[in-house]
Amino acid sequence: MIRLSKPFIEEEEIDAVSEVLKSGNLIQGARVKEFEAAIQSYSGAKFAVAVSNCTAALHLSLLSLNVQADDLVLVSSFSWPSTANVICLCGAHPVFIDINPRTFNMDANSLRRTLTSLMSNNSISKKVKAIIPVHTFGQMADMINIMDVAKNFGVPVIEDAACALGAEYRNKKAGRYGEIGCFSFHPRKAITTGEGGMVVTDNETIYRYIRALRNHGLDSLSLTPKFIIPGYNYRLSDIHAALGTIQMSKIDTLIEKKVQQAKIYNNEFQNSSIRSPYTDEDAKHVFQSYVVKLDQDMATERTSIIRKLSDSGIQTTIGTYHMPMLEYFRIRYNHTPDTCPESFKVEQSLVSLPLHHELTTEEQATVAESLKALCQ
Ligand SMILES: *Cc1c(COP(=O)(O)O)cnc(C)c1O
């Protein structure tokens, strides 16, 4: 089987985890602080807080911006469901913003139009609490224009950078444009801790609040135990963090490998009906996934193409989800394909191909040839 993805784990990682297990200090020890320091210095943010996964990171980010029942949060329509789920978990409502069909990222003009209309109504404008752009598949959204719109209306931005650790836009890293950036260390992301997430910010108030929320509401700055809010337990263990620190020492190599493999695929798909990922010249794409677009008339065949590839030993999958049409959002908010038509259309024609360090050039050629043959 040519696998879709495979985490890069060496003896070093195994040793680091064994050491934590042998030490007897499994949580709230030095390994979490080390991992936070590694992400903090790599991202260039003032503060980093490790949490149990990126969904927790997004949830706490919204709470730290005081998102409450009946508030509105503007969010890219094309993402893994957790990006919108966390809005509902705060009792608030997602307002979906359509994507640019080339980059699959939030379209700044759609954002401007929706925000202009919401902010023109006084009772509604008070409810608009945050904007969540997503850096889809490892390529950053147009953060210059998105931040311009957000600042114009004074609405804070949370970057869903789950797939974008190491990605840049005009030489500025993912997680550094918005008030808050959130990363994932799920095994399909750039580096992994099994499960894991991180919040980065320059804002000390947000930092302190998120630290309390991840740990039962305990104020991390108080010398005596002081529970200042009802918090969660969204902590990352030292077992996971030890893995993360070792992984961080390899991040540049891991990204470079994927960028090179993406070039190989790009060559394979030249002069075919299969479109390789569009890369924005302002963006450094880190290829969390290599996702191709099928011709519109092949889109109806996608499920069978994915199945046939699997039958011939090649594991592929869809790109990601058009969230307004997921059952919960569709029924609750009466969404139709006309809510964000670009992401509705794009969703059906994307296929994510195998991409990981063990994948050989020959295997990449096999994947490309097999896909091309099925699309004729
Ligand atoms: C993976 C992913 C998440 C969720 O991350 P977890 O760490 O699995 O909770 C959220 N948003 C996007 C865009 C993702 O790709």
Image (cartoon, helix red, strand yellow):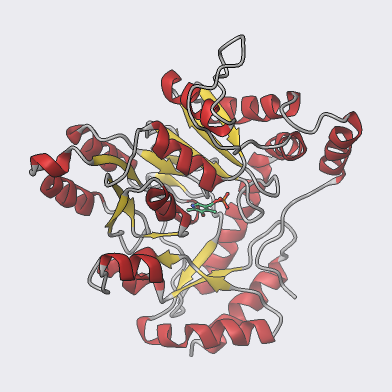
Q: Position of residue 213 (x, y in %)?
A: 52, 31
Q: Where is residue 277 in the image (x, y as percent from the top left)?
A: 45, 63
Residue at screen point 50% across, 21% down = 46
Quarter of the rendering occupied by the N terminus: bottom right
Q: Answer yes or no: is residue 171 visible.
A: no
Q: Where is residue 34 in the image (x, y as percent from the top left)?
A: 70, 25
Give residue 198's quadrant in the image: top right
Give residue 15's quadrant in the image: top right
What is the number of callouts on the image?
0
Give residue 188's quadrant in the image: bottom right
Q: Answer yes or no: is residue 264 visible.
A: yes
In the image, residue 15 sits, relative to residue 34, either above or below, namely below
Q: Is residue 229 left or right of residue 308?
A: left
Judging depth in this view, the residue of 53 and 305 nearest the camera is: 53
Residue at screen point 65% across, 70% down = 364
Residue at screen point 33% across, 51% down = 75
Q: Where is residue 300 in the image (x, y as percent from the top left)?
A: 42, 87
In the image, residue 314 sits, relative to residue 320, either above or below, namely below
In the image, residue 354 sits, relative to residue 141, either above or below, namely below
Judging depth in this view, the residue of 358 and 201 nearest the camera is: 201
Q: In this view, does 162 lie to the left or right of 294?
A: right
